[in-house]
Image: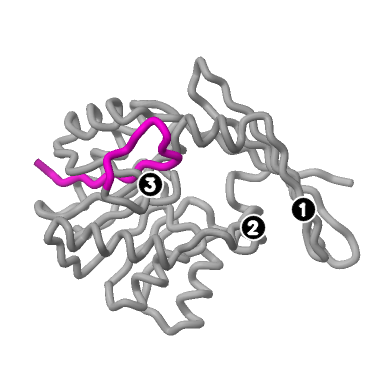
């Protein structure tokens, strides 16, 4: 059986929505709208960074927002475009990297959800991303993003293996966290049916854990003020028990 190493999310895209069926995107979009209301933001246009298969983009567009999405995985974007087409939603999707994208437009709100921020390998990359976002955000706009925490990785992923078999695909998902580098490596093996055979694909994902103080420091250096760091889906300050932390920032 041949094996192909593919970039993150290119083959994951095939099964992504089925594997992530437990993610409550309606709740996520409602939470984002509640943050808009909390900070007096009435966005007309929204940029969804690392938009993936467009689940959040589609929900927000269906509520009347003008949504633009960016993702570096063409496989994910293909699915996102199909979703928008099926629902007749005017969403523009761009192939690009959240770390260094460039669009000739500014947005009232910029989102980067589902721990996409953790894919920045180091502080320099994260700082560069914050600076790139600042060039595309209107002065009173909101930058909303979240990070997964070390507690979440250690409790639910470190040294754990997940697997499932389906008629058209199977996967093996292995995780390992290195405390001294704060880096979680995920090794994904997919077996995807192609005709009468299954082809094997491998993806390696790396996610870096960032402490709140580090995120706040980098935001300030890039010209933002941090408005809040909440335990996910709440308006409560994050704690060491938080599995995910949601940040809201604004240009200073």
Q: Nearer the viewer, residue 89 or 194?
A: 89
* Horizontal side of residue 57 vs 75, given as left or right: left
Residue 169, image x, y percentages: 78, 59
Q: Which residue is mark 1?
A: 164
* Horizontal side of residue 181 vs 107, given as left or right: right
Residue 128, image x, y percentages: 30, 34
How many angstroms separate mark 3 from mark 2 (CA)? 23 Å
Residue 226, image x, y percentages: 18, 39
Residue 81, image x, y percentages: 49, 71
Mark yes or no: residue 189 visible: no
Q: Nearer the viewer, residue 247 or 116?
A: 247
| Residue drawn where x is 10% and y is 52% of the image | 139
Q: Please say if the residues under marks 1 and 2 sit with CB atoms less than 8 Å apart.
A: yes
Above/below status of 122 relative to 3: above
Q: Which one is earlier in the sequence, the residue at label 3 or at label 2?
A: 2
Q: Using the rendered view, name the quadrant where residue 17 is placed.
A: bottom right
Residues shaded magenta: 236-252
Q: Is residue 249 magenta?
A: yes
Above/below status of 57 relative to 210: below
Q: Which residue is mark 3?
A: 98
Above/below status of 221 relative to 77: above
How many angstroms separate mark 1 from mark 3 (CA)? 30 Å
Q: Which residue is mark 2?
A: 19
**Of the two numbered discs 1 and 3 in the rendering, the one whose residue sits closer to the viewer:** 1
How many angstroms separate mark 1 from mark 2 (CA)? 9 Å
Q: Residues within 10 Å of mark 3 (few under 14, many from 20)?
A: many
Q: Which one is earlier in the sequence, the residue at label 1 or at label 3?
A: 3
């Amino acid at each position: 059986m041949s094996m192909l190493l593919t970039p993150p999310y290119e083959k994951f895209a095939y099964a992504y929505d089925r594997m992530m069926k437990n993610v409550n995107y309606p709740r996520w979009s409602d939470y984002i709208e509640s943050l808009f209301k909390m900070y007096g933001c009435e966005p007309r246009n929204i940029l969804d960074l690392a938009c993936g298969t467009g689940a959040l983009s589609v929900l927000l567009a269906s509520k009347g927002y003008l949504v633009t999405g960016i993702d570096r995985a063409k496989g994910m974007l293909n699915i996102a475009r199909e979703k928008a087409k099926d629902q007749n939603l005017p969403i523009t999707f761009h192939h690009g990297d959240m770390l260094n994208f460039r669009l000739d437009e500014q947005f009232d709100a910029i989102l980067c959800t589902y721990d996409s921020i953790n894919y920045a390998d180091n502080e320099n990359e994260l700082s560069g991303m914050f600076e790139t976002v600042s060039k595309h955000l209107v002065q009173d706009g909101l930058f909303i993003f979240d990070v997964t925490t070390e507690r979440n990785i250690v409790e639910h992923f470190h040294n754990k293996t997940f697997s499932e078999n389906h008629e058209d695909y199977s996967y093996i998902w292995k995780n390992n966290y290195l405390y001294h580098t704060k880096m979680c490596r995920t090794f994904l093996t997919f077996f995807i049916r192609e005709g009468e055979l299954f082809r094997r694909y491998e993806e390696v994902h790396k996610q870096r854990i960032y402490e709140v103080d580090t995120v706040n420091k980098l935001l300030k250096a890039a010209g933002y003020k941090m408005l809040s760091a909440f335990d996910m889906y709440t308006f409560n300050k994050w704690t060491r028990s938080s599995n995910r932390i949601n940040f809201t920032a604004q240009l200073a």
